[in-house]
Image (tube, helix red, strand yellow):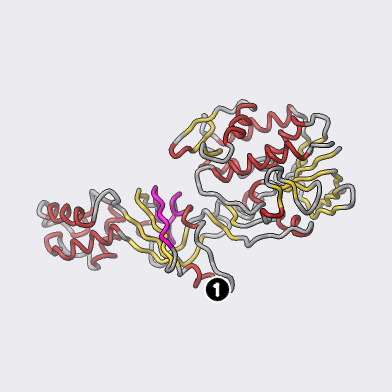
């Protein structure tokens, strides 16, 4: 009996291993369009591979999988899990070693054109070469985010052709584009609080590192807020994005009054310095100049000229530096896809389709997107484990 897995990312790899262990008699094959497995895994966590999160669903099952392939894990801030080596290559190599040990077939550099289902089997038609036949298949092709790693959204087409519904797709966990000029502060990083605001909605707060780009804002807390930016049906993209603003508190440990008092005391010690210098010990110099100009305009004056009301206005601005969102960076810079194969059409305990017997799903191709911190990889590993246990049952 043949099992074919289309897509050799996190979900496909874990699925293949669990299936081969569950039923050693089954013939397991992975079809992957890239020249190696786990291409996107290499890029996670800036190459360190934020492999999962200790707070993820059924983390025990995933940790057991890691232990079983000899992968040593370390726990860092907010439960983020990394390979102890902090090298993504360690993760891929450990999984590849187990795949080879289990004699799972790998068909690399192979692109699937479409999938057809007859009464008793699946026919997988390739762009090049003879068709592949399978008794059961799994679609673990990833989403559309980061197409440079081969994730072009093929799985949605396969699922739709087999009768499944695809919820609205959008890039998420990405930098956002904001109104204004950012060339002078490109690359500046600060720690603070970012709040996403939309009229009529409750504000959403994220705390962490914020990075300024040439077009707006980035960083983990901005990525997490980007998940919540939803464009209403029928609305133009730019108009939809402009419904949102992001407010930064660059000194969250203090109040406006305390900050104003501090700056007024500091003023007496640096009367002859240029005005933006009042912020230099608080913010990176480039950002100090940017924030000062945003609040008070003209920078070509001295600290001594800043009045008490202006100092309060400056404090309020630093505590609530506001940016209008005008767009997102799109698929290439997004870490994840929002939307996918509708969850109500999948048995989430087994990952088998409720519509097509013998068809399984896993990973980013389904309608799931989690926050930064390893949750999306955690979901992919867990989907693979569930599907792997069940795809070979009854064979």
Please state if 148 lies on the left or on the right of 394 as rendered.
Answer: left
Across and down, in percent, residue 344 comes to 68, 54
Question: Which residue is at a point 59% across and 52% down the rendered structure image?
Answer: 146
Question: Which residue is at a point 57% across and 40% down the rendered structure image?
Answer: 57
Closer-to-camera residue (289/340): 340
Please state if 293 lies on the left or on the right of 32 as rendered.
Answer: left
Q: Is residue 264 above or below residue 376?
A: below
Across and down, in percent, residue 152 comes to 67, 55
Q: Quadrant of the C terminus?
A: top right
Residue 216 colored magenta? Answer: yes
Closer-to-camera residue (272/96): 96
Question: Which residue is at a point 43% across and 66% down the rendered structure image?
Answer: 198
Across and down, in percent, residue 230 comes to 53, 63
Q: Is residue 92 above or below residue 112?
A: above
Q: Residues within 10 Å of mark 1 (few under 14, many from 20)?
A: few
Secondary structure category for the residue under label 1:
loop
Q: Is residue 151 above or below residue 63?
A: below
Closer-to-camera residue (378/350): 350
Q: Quadrant of the N terminus?
A: top right
Question: Which residue is at a point 80% across and 52% down the rendered structure image?
Answer: 356
Across and down, in percent, residue 276 comes to 22, 58
Residue tagged 1:
235
Give the residues drawn in magenta, as a range: 202-222
Please state if 302 lies on the left or on the right of 155 as rendered.
Answer: left
Residue 161 colored magenta? Answer: no
């Amino acid at each position: 009996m043949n099992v074919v897995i289309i897509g050799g990312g996190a979900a496909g790899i874990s699925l293949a291993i669990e299936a081969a262990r569950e039923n050693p008699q089954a013939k397991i094959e992975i079809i992957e369009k890239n020249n190696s497995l786990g291409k996107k895994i290499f890029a996670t966590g800036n190459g360190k591979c934020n492999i999962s999160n200790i707070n993820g669903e059924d983390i025990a099952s995933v940790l057991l999988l890691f232990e079983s392939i000899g992968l040593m894990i370390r726990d860092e801030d907010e439960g983020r899990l990394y390979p102890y080596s902090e090298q993504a290559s360690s993760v891929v190599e450990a999984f590849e070693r187990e795949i080879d040990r289990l004699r799972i077939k790998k068909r690399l550099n192979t692109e699937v054109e479409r999938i057809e289902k007859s009464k008793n089997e699946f026919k997988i038609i390739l762009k090049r070469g003879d068709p592949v036949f399978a008794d059961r298949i799994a679609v673990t092709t990833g989403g559309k985010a980061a197409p440079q790693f081969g994730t072009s959204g093929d799985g949605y087409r396969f699922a739709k052709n087999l009768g499944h519904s695809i919820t609205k797709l959008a890039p998420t966990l990405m930098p956002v584009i904001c109104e204004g000029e950012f060339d002078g502060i490109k690359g500046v990083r600060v720690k603070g609080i970012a709040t996403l605001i939309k009229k009529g909605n409750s504000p959403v707060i994220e705390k962490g590192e914020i990075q300024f780009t040439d077009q707006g804002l980035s960083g983990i807390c901005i990525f997490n807020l980007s998940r919540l930016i939803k464009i209403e049906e029928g609305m133009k993209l730019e108009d939809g994005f402009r419904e949102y603003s992001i407010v930064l508190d660059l000194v969250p440990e203090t109040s406006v009054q305390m900050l104003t008092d501090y700056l007024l005391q500091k003023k007496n010690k640096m009367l002859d310095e240029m005005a933006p210098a009042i912020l230099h010990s608080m913010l990176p110099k480039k950002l100090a100049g940017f924030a000062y100009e945003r609040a008070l305009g003209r920078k070509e004056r001295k600290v001594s000229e800043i009045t008490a009301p202006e100092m309060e206005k400056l404090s309020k601005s630093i505590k609530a530096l506001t940016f209008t969102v005008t767009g997102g960076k799109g698929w290439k810079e997004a870490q994840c896809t929002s939307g996918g194969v509708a969850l109500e059409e999948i048995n989430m305990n087994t990952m088998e389709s409720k519509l097509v017997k013998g068809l399984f799903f896993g990973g980013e191709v389904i309608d799931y997107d989690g926050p930064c911190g390893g949750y999306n990889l955690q979901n992919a590993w867990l989907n693979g484990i569930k599907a792997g246990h069940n795809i070979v049952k009854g064979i």
